[in-house]
Amino acid sequence: MTIDCSTESAVCDEFSVISYPALRYFDGHGYTKPYRGPRRASAITSFLKRAVRPTVTALDEENTTNFQSVDGTVLIARINPRDEHVATAFTAIASQFQDRASFGSVDATGTTTVTCFNNRDEQKFALSDLTAIDALSKLVESCTASLIGEFTRANEMKYLKSGKSLVFFFATSSDEREAYVNKMRPVAKMYKEYLSFVTVDANEYGDFAAPLGLTPGVFPALSVQNPMYGQNFPYTEGAEISPETVGAFVMDIVQGKVKPWDGQSRQERVQTHDEL
């Protein structure tokens, strides 16, 4: 069912729709689950598959391995029956994050552990020390975070306050952005302690480009920003954007071989050069 919020504002208010398009899943038993992921068919399909699963799927040793690959992000808890409090906490965290990941549990005879599989980025996170109150939530947040995320106004401050420099990639086509993510993962993984790689939908957020020293409307384009020092390093317009060239560009910045953008647009730099 579709709802036009411009004419059915009361319905949209009832379900806390503050921007759209927005998606809500109704389970038929009075519960509603909001979708907070990317606006892509594959991501929405994954969300719907999660929505019809139990909050925590009961597993045994025979089907645990298969369950690891049912979703982009999968958490499996191996819980010793004596750690009933962990089972309760795991169910609670699964209820909170079920729209973004799939959760399963299996009885264990040894130490209770929780393992998270980020299948999109081929990363694995394991946790055995569950004494901290926020241990599970931190594990989920770390594991669900994409190596290369999508930069929007909604998450802008999260990235800017991360303490890392940002590598922005602008493209108008979702296929272009997805292809960039797939080929750039090794570089993003190599520098993940220091850099956050993000994509930007140039159709919707093209106004982000100019403050980064890029020519508005000329995409695809890439720029590196150091928020701490307010420095921007626009990548050469029209140059190849590949793992090798971007990796070399990042190293040149670190080594001081590339100077930060001086605030002039490309057209202003050309005019200044002509005048000289």
Image (cartoon, rainbow, N blue to C red):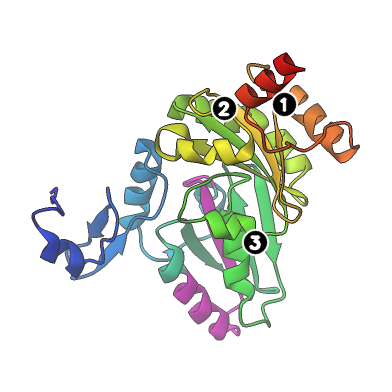
Mark 2 highlights which residue? 215
Q: Which of 235 and 275 is in front in this view?
A: 275
In the depicted structure, whether residue 176 falls above or below residue 230: above
**Disc 3: CA contacts within 10 A as few (<14), some (14-19) or many (>=20):** few
Inspect the magenta stretch and tell me whether residue 88 lies in it.
Answer: yes
Mark 1 highlights which residue? 243
Amino acid identity at mark 3: Lys
Mark 3 highlights which residue? 161
Res 161 quadrant in image: bottom right
Q: How far apart are marks 2 and 1 (CA)?
A: 22 Å
User: SS for tag 3?
Assistant: loop
User: SS for tag 2?
Assistant: loop
Instruction: State the residue at coordinates (22%, 66%).
Output: 15
First reached walking from the N terminus: tag 2 or tag 1: 2
Q: Position of residue 56 (x, y in %)?
A: 43, 66
First reached walking from the N terminus: tag 1 or tag 3: 3
